[in-house]
Amino acid sequence: MAHYQTTRWSLVQMAGDEGVDGRNALGQLLEVYRPVIESRFRREHIDGVTAEDLCQEFFVRAIQDDFFSKARSEKGSLRAYLKTAVERFVLNQKRNSLTEKRGSGARHETEEELVDVASSQDRPDQNFDRLWAQGILNEALKRLRNEDLKKGKVDLF
C-alpha cells in the first residue's frame, strides 16, 4: 500500500498544536508559503531585507494569534485565508507607516526594483495567486523527484 503525503489541511491543523509535531508542521508550512508572502511585501516596493523582516513579523504574529488553529477547510481555501491575513497585515503596516512623522524612514527604490515593479502588470492579488500556484507546483515537483530518487529512477525525472 502506498504512503501518501499529509494533506495541507492536516499540516495546518497540526501547526496549531504544541509539541514536536506542531513545530514540524509549522516549519513545513513556513517553508512552502514564505516565498509567496515575502514577494507580496516586495510588491509594495519594500526592499529585500525589510520584506524578510515583515515576513518574519507576520509569522510571529500568526503564531502568537494561534492563526493556524483557527483555519477551517469548511470555511474556504487555505490560500484565501492566508491571502486575506497577508492583505490585512499589509494594510496595517501602511496605516502604521502613515502615522510616522512625515519623511522619517523614507526609502528610495533602486532602479532595479523600479524596473521589476514596472515590468509586472499583475495586480498584487494576481501576483499572490500566481506565486501561490508556483509554490504548489514546486512542492509537487520536489515530491515527485524524491519519489523517483527513492525508487532509484532519478534519471527518468
Image: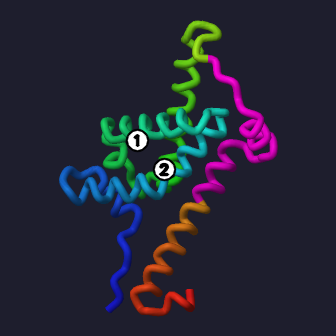
Q: Quadrant of residue 138?
A: bottom right
Q: Which residue is the site of mark 2?
A: 34
Query: Could you give the CA–CA distance between mark 2 and mark 1, rounded to whole angstroms?
Result: 9 Å
Q: Position of residue 147 (x, y in %)?
A: 44, 84
113 shown above or below 128: above
Residue 43 at x, y percent in the picture: 66, 39
Determine whether, in the image, residue 39 is placed left or right of residue 6. Answer: right
Q: Quadrant of residue 67?
A: top left
Which residue is the extreme one toward the left?
19
> Residue at the spot x=75%, y=43% of the render?
116
N-term mark: 2 or 1 = 2
Nearer to us in this view, 11 or 35: 35
Residues at circles 2 and 1 in contact by the CB criterion of under 8 Å: yes
Q: Is residue 154 above or below residue 107?
A: below
Please report the residue visible at 41 percent of the width from the left and 91 percent of the height from the top.
151
Q: Is residue 69 magenta?
A: no
The magenta stretch is 106-132
Amino acid type of disc 1? Phe
Q: Please name the residue that numbered disc 1 is placed on.
A: 59
Label 2: how many Cα within 10 Å (few below 14, some 14–19, many 20+): some
Looking at the picture, how far across and down is residue 110, in whole percent?
72, 33
Q: Secondary structure at mark 1?
A: helix
Say how the picture is coloured.
rainbow
> Which amino acid, mark 2?
Arg
State whether residue 151 is above or below residue 106: below
User: What kind of secondary structure does the magenta stretch mostly adopt?
Assistant: helix
